[in-house]
Image (cartoon, helix red, strand yellow):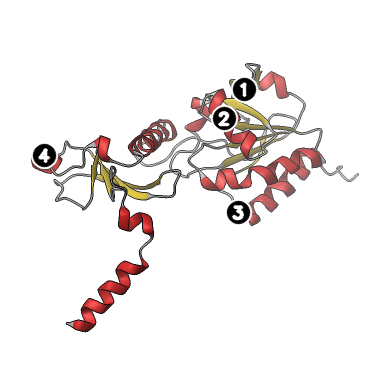
């Protein structure tokens, strides 16, 4: 028994100060379920569930769970009042953003799980999108140029992490037209791209393009040749994928001459 008590004391002493205090006036919950905050996992009704991890700007984390049925009143009574939750608005905004992204990215996903996205060898689809300055870009705007398009959103950590490196591509290929596209408005897109030194031309409120993500996830990068044909397209990012993308941009920008 003494050994158990000693271990508990050592465990409590190792907790961060913020956790011991847990702030006198607010609480850091563990779960956010259908818009309600909880310290512990309540007993939930049978339902399809979605799970996602969220964190606030201070690094506090919780698990967000979405059910396709309403929570019973007996469970709601156990919830922490919103005004008592530390950074409640940040967590709720995160849930709303993820819900919006799910609606946009899966808008065209069929019952069998398939969806349309630009593929190598196919003409790049018709588009008409505006950039952060309000300038309108269409297929005619890029005619005769190699184009690279990168789809991202603010909640995608890998998207933000690769932005500084992507900016160097613009310097390597000055004749290539580089675009990014997001569903965010110009104000938020500028804040993020400035912070991460992303120097491409940024298309905003490009909601139709978000459906090309489908079930594959962000980022999504497409290389289009001078004839408007998709040369290469890839979901996700990694050092290997970015190296492959660079090679594909080179191929499209400097096609090999046909041997006579």
Residue at mark 2 to residue at mark 4: CA–CA distance: 39 Å
Q: Mark number for residue 232?
A: none
What residue appears at the point 23 percent right and 83 percent down from the top-left corner? 3
Give the residue number, with chain letter if any, for mark 4. Answer: 72
In front of the other: label 1 or label 3?
A: 1
Q: Is residue 35 visible?
A: no
Q: Provide the secondary structure element on which disc 3 rests.
A: loop
Q: Earlier in the sequence, mark 2 or mark 3?
A: 2
CB within 8 Å, label 2 to label 3 = no
Q: CA distance from mark 1 to mark 3?
A: 27 Å
Do callouts 1 and 2 mark residues in contact (Cβ within 8 Å)? yes
Q: Where is mark 3, residue-wise? A: 238
In this rendering, position of residue 127 left or right of residue 111:
right
Residue 37 at x, y percent in the picture: 25, 42
Q: Earlier in the sequence, mark 1 or mark 2?
A: 1
Q: What residue sits right under mark 1 in the picture?
A: 132
């Amino acid at each position: 028994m003494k050994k158990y008590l000693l271990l508990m004391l050592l465990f409590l002493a190792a907790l961060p100060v913020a956790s011991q205090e847990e702030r006198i006036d607010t609480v850091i919950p563990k779960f956010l379920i259908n818009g309600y905050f909880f310290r512990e996992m309540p007993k939930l009704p049978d339902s399809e569930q979605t799970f996602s991890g969220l964190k606030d700007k201070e690094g506090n984390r919780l698990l967000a769970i979405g059910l396709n049925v309403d929570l019973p009143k007996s469970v709601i009574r156990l919830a922490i009042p919103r005004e008592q939750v530390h950074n409640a608005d940040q967590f709720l905004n995160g849930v709303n953003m993820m819900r919006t992204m799910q609606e946009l990215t899966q808008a065209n996903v069929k019952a069998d799980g398939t969806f349309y996205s630009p593929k190598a060898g196919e003409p790049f689809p018709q588009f008409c999108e505006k950039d952060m300055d309000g300038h309108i870009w269409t297929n005619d705007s890029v005619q005769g140029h190699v184009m690279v398009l990168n789809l991202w959103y603010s909640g995608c950590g890998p998207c933000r992490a690769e932005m500084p490196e992507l900016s160097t591509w613009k310097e390597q290929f000055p004749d290539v037209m580089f675009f990014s596209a997001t569903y965010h408005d110009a104000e938020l897109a500028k804040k993020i791209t400035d912070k991460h030194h992303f120097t491409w031309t940024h298309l905003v409120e490009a909601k139709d393009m978000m459906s090309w993500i489908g079930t594959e996830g962000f980022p999504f990068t497409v290389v289009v040749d001078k004839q408007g044909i998709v040369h290469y397209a890839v979901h996700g990012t990694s050092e290997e994928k970015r190296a492959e993308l660079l090679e594909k941009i080179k191929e499209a920008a400097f096609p090999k001459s046909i041997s006579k």
